[in-house]
Image (cartoon, helix red, strand yellow):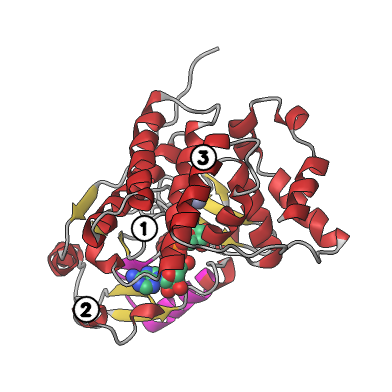
Amino acid sequence: TKRHYKNFPMVPRVVYGRGSFDQLADILLPKRKNSDAPFIFLVDDFFENSDLQTRIPWLFNDQIIFISADEEPKTTQVDELVKKIKADFDEVPSGIVGIGGGTLLDLAKAVAIMLGNKGSSENYQGWDLVNKPALYHVGVPTISGTGAEVSRTAVLLGPEKKLGINSDFTTYDQVVLDPDLTGTVLTEQWFYTGMDCFIHCVESLNGTYLNAFSQSYGEKAYELCKEVFLEDLPKEEAEEKLMMASWHGGMSIAYSQVGIAHAMSYGLSYVLGTKHGIGNCIVFTHLEEYYPEGVALFNKMRQKHSITLPKNICANLGEEEMDTMITVAYSMEALWENALGKNWKECISKEDLKNIYRKI
Ligand code: NAD
Ligand code: ZN
């Protein structure tokens, strides 16, 4: 059989450095189609009335929309934003700028795609269903770990599934990496989102899909995470290293896949609304059998930063909810295949999943 390798897009432009956020005005200027075609800034509402707000380079009739990251992005939310933007402006916007964590970064990607494509965003959840380009879109991460700034997916909660819009048009056209912006993240959130990166590395490096391309990024990110979470680095150095760990961790899974913690965390998220970072952590501590070295390191990191994870969150689940959770997790075939190989169904049953969930 003929070999076939994925030909995937990378972020074509990136600026890195403390204070680089202030270059955004210059970066956007040549992309402005005319004074009636605005830039839309989708910003985590943590930054409402902050110093960062005053530094957003809005001009003409640009719009800043503050959005809460309390809940993960939904297809309905994307559709409403697109409708609002279309109603507010006669011209197609010059572009979309997402400022925030994985939640805002994914929302901004999805809105940029849907301003270039017809119908509802739920029709594009899946692989390569987008057929027209997105609007020009820029990502500015303010918390490090998800890798959403580099990935070709925008994960959305739809009416039937939690699934990404995976497409060549999803990836950002421009990313601004300014470690200064992450200085205000609270310890717990820093840990949960940072562990998302660590878990990306563990799942990619221990997966059957691994190749030298993914490995080279995964190993770098893994080393950076160990430095950040197990050594006592100065705050600024830790911020810088975690930002680059997130980037490399994202690159590592681009050419491979995540694994068991992510599959099971998707189940938690779907049924209980558990957020991605903390959900991964809650699951990961119970996966010693599958990722012994990773889980041991994770527990060390957790202890060092005195993080206590919620317990027994599935204890009171009814059978029906439990079944839904298992069905959602078990349907993530690529993740299981990456983790356990082609005959993964022989390695782990739905009953095994239930036993793990009952402990969570
Ligand atoms: P988040 O965006 O949900 O934000 C978490 C919390 O941190 C929020 O309360 C937010 O207001 C706050 N916050 C963000 N920046 C801050 C700052 N500088 N100072 C203080 N508080 C700040 O968190 P996340 O973990 O980055 O993102 C999770 C989302 O990312 C999930 O929806 C998940 O599905 C998605 N995700 C996407 C990918 C991808 O490749 N597209 C990969 C992994 C996860
Ligand atoms: Zn993740």
Asked if the stretch drawn in magenta spans residue 135, the answer is: no
Residue type at mark 2 is Trp
Q: Closer to the N terminus: mark 2 or mark 1?
A: 2
290 in relation to 178, above or below = above
Asked if the stretch drawn in magenta spans residue 92, the answer is: yes
Question: Is the residue at mark 2 in contact range of ligand 1, meaning its CB lies under 8 Å from it?
Answer: no
Rendering quarter of residue 92: bottom left
Q: Nearer the viewer, residue 164 or 246?
A: 246
Residue interval drawn in magenta? 78-100
| Quadrant position of the C terminus in the picture | bottom right
Residue type at mark 3 is Gly
- Residue 58 is marked as 2
Q: Residue at x 57, y 53 (%)?
A: 280
- Work out how far the residue at label 2 is from the one at label 1, CA to CA, in angstroms: 25 Å
Rendering quarter of residue 8: top left
Q: Residue at x 55, y 12 (%)?
A: 1
Q: Which residue is mark 1?
A: 144
Give the SS element for disc 2.
Answer: loop
**Of the two numbered discs 3 and 1 in the rendering, the one whose residue sits closer to the viewer:** 3
**Of the two numbered discs 3 and 2 in the rendering, the one whose residue sits closer to the viewer:** 3
Asked if residue 9 can be seen in this view, the reply is: no
Classify mark 3: residues with Cα within 10 Å, few (<14), some (14-19) or many (20+).
many
**Of the two numbered discs 2 and 1 in the rendering, the one whose residue sits closer to the viewer:** 1
Instruction: Pinpoint residue 237: horizontal percent, then vertical percent.
Output: 23, 55
Classify mark 2: residues with Cα within 10 Å, few (<14), some (14-19) or many (20+).
some
Q: Closer to the N terminus: mark 3 or mark 2?
A: 2
